[in-house]
Amino acid sequence: MARVATTLTTLLGIVATLVVTISSAVVLLAHLGEPARETTAEPQPTWQVLRSSYAEVRVPPVSRGWSVPDPDGVLFYADRRGEPVVGVEGPAVLDDGYCERGDTDAPSHRAFVGITPPVPDPGPRAADRRLQAAWTAGIAGTTGEPLTTRRTTVRLADGSPAAASRTTIRLHDRDPCTPSHVELHLVSTRTGDGVVSTVLVRDLGPRSATDETVRRILMSLRAL
């Protein structure tokens, strides 16, 4: 993941809670002339819950490479002076530390997702546009290039209406840990305190988060 600066420690944190729910399916198999026999399917790994005081979102389990390395930290994109431009608190990341950056302490991962604080309610569409512009500029920096943006309205898993956008960005300021393209996903919905959004950024590569995983994460956003 390109140009992501060091995680900062802050008192404002998002905690990741692993909801432990063990379930298994019972399947009856029968053949003609044979008594039915009972088999138990393997339980599916439970997704983690990334929760703030205003919203929550579900992310894949640790067994699929997702973790919250610093629940009390901020992951941000910085400008040339090292000043934060955009960021999220306590994000979940995919394949944390997969690429060695040498003498820099900047983190590496194939994707991350976090929740933004609520903003005064301009409507989900307007909030999505503002966030999309800010995050695109932060990710692209002075050398990157946004290629395409698609916007739509969706219904979240709990039935709430939301605005969504998907932006592909080409990166030119690269190092061995930086992909040529990344994708920025946003989903914004109303809460009692304003509009809250899920921000997901992923490398566009064969080992990054799949479209289905991204869709499931984004649609799980739920206002508290």
Image (cartoon, rainbow, N blue to C red):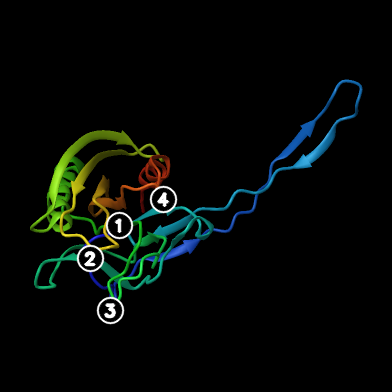
- The CA span between labels 1 and 2 is 13 Å
- The CA span between labels 4 and 1 is 23 Å
Dot 3 or dot 1: first in sequence order is 3
Q: Is residue 32 visible?
A: yes
Q: Secondary structure at mark 3?
A: loop
Q: Quadrant of the N terminus?
A: bottom left
Dot 1 or dot 2: first in sequence order is 2
Foreground tag (4 vs 1)? 4
Report x, y in % for residue 139. 18, 56
* Disc 4 residue type (three-letter): Arg
Dot 2 or dot 3: first in sequence order is 2
Residue on which disc 1 sits:
115
Residue on which disc 3 sits:
103
- The CA span between labels 3 and 4 is 25 Å
Q: Residue at coordinates 83% horizontally, 27% vertically from top-left?
A: 30
Residue on which disc 4 sits:
207
Q: Is residue 52 visible?
A: no
Vertical comparison of 154 with 191: above or below: above
Q: Is residue 132 left or right of residue 101?
A: left
- The CA span between labels 3 and 1 is 30 Å
* Disc 3 residue type (three-letter): Asp
Q: Which of these two is toward me, 110 or 36?
A: 110
Dot 4 or dot 1: first in sequence order is 1
Report x, y in % for residue 186. 26, 46
Residue on which disc 2 sits:
76
Q: Residue at coordinates 18% horizontally, 45% vertically from top-left?
A: 128
Dot 4 or dot 2: first in sequence order is 2
Q: Are marks 3 and 1 in contact (CB under 8 Å)?
A: no
Q: Are marks 2 and 3 in contact (CB under 8 Å)?
A: no
Q: Secondary structure at mark 4?
A: loop
